[in-house]
Image (cartoon, rainbow, N blue to C red):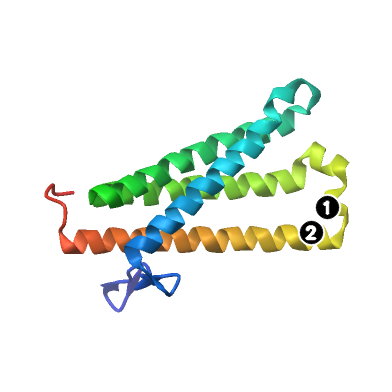
């Protein structure tokens, strides 16, 4: 995007969560993301052994969620390794791949809410309070994901500008 002939950079943060130094906060957010992904994988994989008693759509949704969450976990581990090893290229790859994987995870969440036969049978979304909870959690997850990617991008740009890497990337 160009504004008055200059490239508009992505936003940067000075401190993570307003109080932590950038790198320490990045490690906290990275660990939280990895733990969240592990919980999502466990929840998605929990019902996969019962695949014969479930609708094919629900199995596909669970498998897709587990697959994209596992890929996001790998990208988060790569980001953590990139920060630890001072390799900004790892952070850059993590930003690119995690952006795609997070988008896919949110699309799967929307598909689950709209088309899952198992969710329709449970009547969970028949209550206005539950629908509100799902919408709030959806936006909270999106806000966290955007903030996490912003912190990773800031750390990447800081490392790139500092030139801590001996290898040109």
**Distance (Cα) linking label 1 and label 2:** 6 Å
Q: Are marks 1 and 2 in contact (CB under 8 Å)?
A: yes
Q: Residues within 10 Å of mark 1 (few under 14, many from 20)?
A: some
In the image, farthest residue toward the top: 52
Give the vertical position of 68 relative to 150 (above or below). above
Residue at (44, 48) in percent of width and height: 98
Q: Residues within 10 Å of mark 2 (few under 14, many from 20)?
A: some
On the image, numbered disc 1 is attached to which residue? Answer: 125
User: Where's residue 40, x and y in %?
Assistant: 60, 42
On the image, numbered disc 2 is attached to which residue? Answer: 131
User: Where's residue 21, x and y in %?
Assistant: 34, 68
Q: Which residue occupies the foreground of this view, 58 or 83?
A: 83
Residue at (84, 50) in percent of width and height: 124
Residue at (53, 39) in percent of width and height: 68
**Residue 118 shown left or right of residue 25 in the figure:** right
**Residue 148 shown left or right of residue 57 in the figure:** left
The first of marks 1 and 2 along the sequence is 1
Mark 1 secondary-structure assignment: helix
Residue 9, quarter of picture: bottom left
Mark 2 secondary-structure assignment: helix
Can residue 26 be seen at all in this image of the molecule?
yes
Check residue 105 in the rendering and tell me which mark sits there, or answer none: none
User: Where's residue 154, x and y in %?
Assistant: 33, 64
Give the vertical position of 25 relative to 30 (above or below). below
Q: Which residue occupies the foreground of this view, 18 or 126?
A: 18
Residue at (16, 52) in percent of width and height: 165
Residue 60, quarter of picture: top right
């Amino acid at each position: 995007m160009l504004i008055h002939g200059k490239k508009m950079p992505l936003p940067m943060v000075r401190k993570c969560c307003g109080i932590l130094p950038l790198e320490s906060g990045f490690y906290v957010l990275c660990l939280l993301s990895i733990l969240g992904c592990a919980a999502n994988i466990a929840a998605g994989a929990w019902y996969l052994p019962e695949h014969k008693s479930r609708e094919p759509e629900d199995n596909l949704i669970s498998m897709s969620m587990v697959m994209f969450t596992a890929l996001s976990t790998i990208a988060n581990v790569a980001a953590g390794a990139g920060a630890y090893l001072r390799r900004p290229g790892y952070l850059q790859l993590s930003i690119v791949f995690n952006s795609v994987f997070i988008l896919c995870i949110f699309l799967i969440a929307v598909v689950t809410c709209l088309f899952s036969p198992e969710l329709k049978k449970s009547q969970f979304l028949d209550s206005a309070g539950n629908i509100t909870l799902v919408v709030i959690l959806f936006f909270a997850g999106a806000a966290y994901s955007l903030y996490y990617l912003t912190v990773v991008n800031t750390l990447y740009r800081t490392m790139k500008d500092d030139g801590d890497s001996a290898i040109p990337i």
